Each structure stands twice: as C-alpha cells, then as structure tokens.
Image: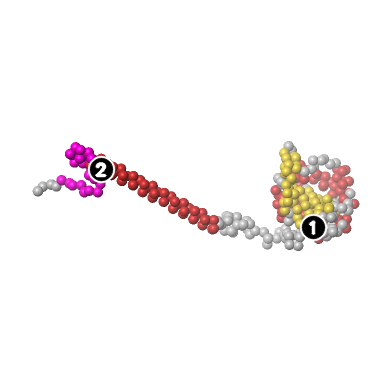
C-alpha cells in the first residue's frame, strides 16, 4: 500500500543545483510566461491557451490536492523558476502514478530535468511507496527520452499518431521506472565522472584509435577467411578442369588432322605435307 500522507504533505526536496518546492501562487507569473513559449507548448503538447488568472488560480489550489503532488523547480543559488513537475493519476491499488514535467526555456539543456526527476523518483519510491512511475514523451523528443533513460525509465510501448501538431502526426512513447530491489537503477549524481566514459572513448569502444571503434570479430573474420579459401579452391579446380578438357580437345583435333594427311598421302602417293606430332623433323644436311 502507498503512503497517502506523503502526497498530502508537500515536501521540499534539495539537490546539488536545484530544489523542488510546493507549487504556489508565487510561481504563477513565471509559469504563465513558460506556457506562452512556442517550444514549451510543442514539447508538452499544449493546445489550450490559458489566461494569467487561470494559471494563478491553478497554482494557488495545488496545496489543497491530497491525491497528487505538484512541485516547482527552483535554482538553488538564485531561486529562479526553472519549471514544474508533478505526480498525477495515482493508483493506490496498483501502487502506480504518472509523472509530468515542464521546464522553462532558460532551464532546457542545463541538466535541470534529470536532477529534478531523480529527486522526485526517490521521494515517490521511498516515501510514497510507489512501485511504478510512468510517463509519456513524444517520439521526436530524443533529448527528453535520453534524459528519462538516464533516470531509469524504459520504453514500454508506442502510441501511433497519438499527437497532432502543425499538420503533422507523431507517435507517443510510454516509459516507466520500477522500484525493485535489484532492478532499480543506480542514480549517478551530476558531476560524478566515475560512471562516465573516459575521455576520447565512447561506450563499446576500445580506447585506441578513433573513439567508439570496435575490434572486428575474430571468429567471424576466420569464418569469412575459410569461406574465401574454399571459394579459391573451387575456382582453381574449375580452371584445371577446363584446361584438361581444352588439352584433350586439342589432341583429338591434331590426331584427326594427322589421319587426314596420311590418308591423302596414301591416295596420291605423295609424302605428307605435315610432320606427325612427336616425330623428329629432318633437316637437309650440307656437304659431304
């Protein structure tokens, strides 16, 4: 069973570079500005247009919600608004919930998303006692998908043409992270170089030559070499066989020609015009 009180009590979660605080009316202006950004609307699939009053009322009501958790992402040093994220659609019986995150334009590409998600996942698994946290991401958003994967999410399915934007249809990926004793991913703090690939070397690379270059499979190379050797033997055998057939045919033609000359010589009483193959040709001897 989940811990419902952990949803009703809005926590403050602090990380290395940011903190998650309860979303309130004080974040309304910055959140409204984020909702009017075209790229933010595209990445979140927001078709609806909101007014400042609607955003203010929505932010002010988040503390009253006991079946979900809405938090604002703030910069730890300056307190600037970087976005908001939430645990929604909580299913107590199946110990599952959905995660949603929206970053302000200034926060994209700075690593704020993964750090915020890791903080919320730890709280969801350890305090709320959830077993599964899932989300949806558009297939064209590769950067977000890679960030989710670094946080332990895996792709579970694809909803074909589930999102329509600017005349184009896009697939939606369903991803989830599980809280399992041996399946929960190791959370790597930002700036921890121990788990990162060495400089000049990509995962799967040998570390020598160009980054990421792999050694050839020796077993496969040996198999290919053996195949080439067999092919060479077949070609050599065919060449020898053709040569024997050719020489045999030439011998038959020569014997036929000799027989024809001998028959003509016997009929006419004249010596053969050609010396049979294998006999020594006589040269005229000079002088006495």
Q: What's the residue at 72%, 47% (across, down)?
A: 158
Q: Which residue is mark 1?
A: 131
Q: Is residue 217 left or right of residue 278?
A: right
State if disc 2 and disc 1 touch (CB < 8 Å): no
- Main SS class of the magenta portion in the image: loop
* Part of the protein shown in magenta: 263-284
* 283 part of magenta stretch: yes
Identity of the residue drawn at 72% across and 39% down: 168
Provide the secondary structure element on which disc 1 rests.
loop
Badge 2 crowding class, 10 Å Cα cut-off, few under 14, some 14 to 19, many 20 or more, is: some
Q: Which mark is residue 258?
A: 2
What residue is at 84 percent from the left and 41 percent from the top?
A: 50
Judged from the image, the secondary structure of the residue bearing numbered disc 2 is: helix
Residue 206 falls in which quadrant of the image?
bottom right
Q: Position of residue 46 (x, y in %)?
A: 79, 43
Q: How is the image coloured?
A: secondary structure
Q: Is 211 rendered above or below residue 168? A: below
Q: Position of residue 132 (x, y in %)?
A: 78, 55
Of residue 43 and residue 260, the one placed in the foreground of this image is 260
Residue 156 % position (x, y): 73, 51
Residue 74 appears anywhere in the view? no
Q: Which quadrant of the figure contains the N terminus? A: bottom right
Kindly report which numbered mark, 1 or 2, lies closer to the viewer in this rendering: 2
Residue 165 x, y percent position in the rendering: 75, 40
Q: Quadrant of residue 126?
A: bottom right
Residue 93: assigned label:
none
Q: Residues within 10 Å of mark 1 (few under 14, many from 20)?
A: some
């Amino acid at each position: 069973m989940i811990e419902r009180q952990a949803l009703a009590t809005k926590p403050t979660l602090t990380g290395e570079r940011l903190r998650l605080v309860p979303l309130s009316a004080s974040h309304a202006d910055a959140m409204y500005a984020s909702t009017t950004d075209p790229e933010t609307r595209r990445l979140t699939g927001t078709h609806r247009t909101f007014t400042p009053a609607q955003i203010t009322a929505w932010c002010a009501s988040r503390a009253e919600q006991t079946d979900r958790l809405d938090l604002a992402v703030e910069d730890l040093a300056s307190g600037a608004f970087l976005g908001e994220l939430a645990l929604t659609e909580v299913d107590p019986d199946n110990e599952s919930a959905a995660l949603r995150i929206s970053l302000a334009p200034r926060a994209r590409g700075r690593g704020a998303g993964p750090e915020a998600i890791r903080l919320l996942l730890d709280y969801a698994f350890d305090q709320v006692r959830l077993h599964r946290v899932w989300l949806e991401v558009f297939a064209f958003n590769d950067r977000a998908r890679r960030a989710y994967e670094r946080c332990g999410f895996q792709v579970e399915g694809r909803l074909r043409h589930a999102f329509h934007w600017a005349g184009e249809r896009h697939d939606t990926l369903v991803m989830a992270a599980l809280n399992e004793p041996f399946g929960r991913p190791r959370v790597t703090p930002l700036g921890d170089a121990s788990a990162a690939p060495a400089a000049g070397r990509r995962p799967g690379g040998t570390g020598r030559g160009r980054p990421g270059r792999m050694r050839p499979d020796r077993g496969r190379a040996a198999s290919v070499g053996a195949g080439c050797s067999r092919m060479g033997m077949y070609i050599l055998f065919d060449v020898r066989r053709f040569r024997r057939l050719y020489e045999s045919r030439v011998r038959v033609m020569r014997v036929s020609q000799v027989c024809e000359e001998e028959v003509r010589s016997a009929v006419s009483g004249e010596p053969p015009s050609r010396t049979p193959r294998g006999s020594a040709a006589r040269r005229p001897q000079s002088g006495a």
